[in-house]
Image (tube, rainbow, N blue to C red):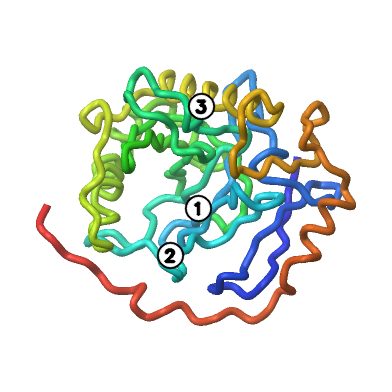
Amino acid sequence: MSFTIEERGRPNTQDYRVFFKNSQGKYISPFHDIPIYANEAENIFHAVVEVPRWTNAKMEIATKDPLNPLKQDVKKGNLRYVANVFPHKGYIWNYGAIPQTWEDPNHKDSDTGCCGDNDPIDICDIGNKVCSRGEIIKVKVLGTLALIDEGETDWKVIVINTEDPEAGDFNDIDDVRRLKPGYLEATFDWFKRYKVPDGKPENQFAFNGEFKDRDFAIKTVKSTHDFWKALISKQTNAGELNCMNTSVSDSPFCCSAADAEAVVKSACAFGAEDPIPSSVDKWFYYEK
């Protein structure tokens, strides 16, 4: 199963979008149409790369837009870039989401005591390859960190790209600790402090910031898939989320290929990119 992207608008502007196509060239939603599983029997999942490693632009699946293209988050009227909190530069993994998952904002998690954040579940790919924006990769789940973001549960699932030459050596969270020493500590530090330069407090975590193991993480991912099934079948109120899809045949939100194409064609034509502001390269220092 292969996927391609089509860019619209001008990169580094608010009209920039990344749409997705399947192997037949039909437009699809990365939220709803890409299968969660690449290999269900072996618990291999698909993941959508929103932010390549070392970059700062906070790209994300636009859950409230038709066909859910990638777009850059906007705060206070400006494009959002994640700050570099020393010693980190941008995102320190390929960051993205697992399709056909949803953290239900009306479900209080029994472990964290907080409701979901209304988004697909997030992944941090620790593989060696720097992926490209919109790339669809197949991943092994290794563990998870439970971030509490402004009172909401925001799982960060640690994964490795199955095509990584070292993927066979990684099967659980302890393998990351052993083979990539310092990476989990850096991950915790990154999520704890990345909003501080914007004037926000340090983030909090469930489980005292401990990473949970592979089995716990897989169970968590599968539970968010169940929440997504309720969402796409209209058993749960979608609220502002856009559930337009082209392949979930029993979904009341399923649309025709022509309807999907009309959404993409209505977006701005692809054009020259704007420069990234020089302030994005600033390094922030503060005592832990």
Cα distance between the residues tagged 1 and 2: 24 Å
- Counting other residues with Cα less than 10 Å from the Cα at mark 3, is it few (<14), some (14-19), or many (20 or more)? many
Left/right placement of residue 100 relative to residue 276 reads right
- Is residue 276 at least partly visible in the picture? yes
Left/right placement of residue 151 relative to residue 257 reads left
Please name the amino acid that badge 2 sits on.
Arg
Q: Would you name the residue on which mark 3 appears?
A: 221
Callout 3: SS = helix
Cα distance between the residues tagged 3 and 2: 27 Å
Callout 2: SS = loop
Q: At x 29% / y 55%, what residue is drawn?
A: 194
Q: At x 43% / y 35%, what residue is drawn?
A: 157
Label of residue 80 in the image: 2
Residue 229 location in percent, x, y? 65, 25
Label of residue 129 in the image: 1
Residue 237 location in percent, x, y? 61, 31
Judging depth in this view, the residue of 174 and 3 nearest the camera is: 3
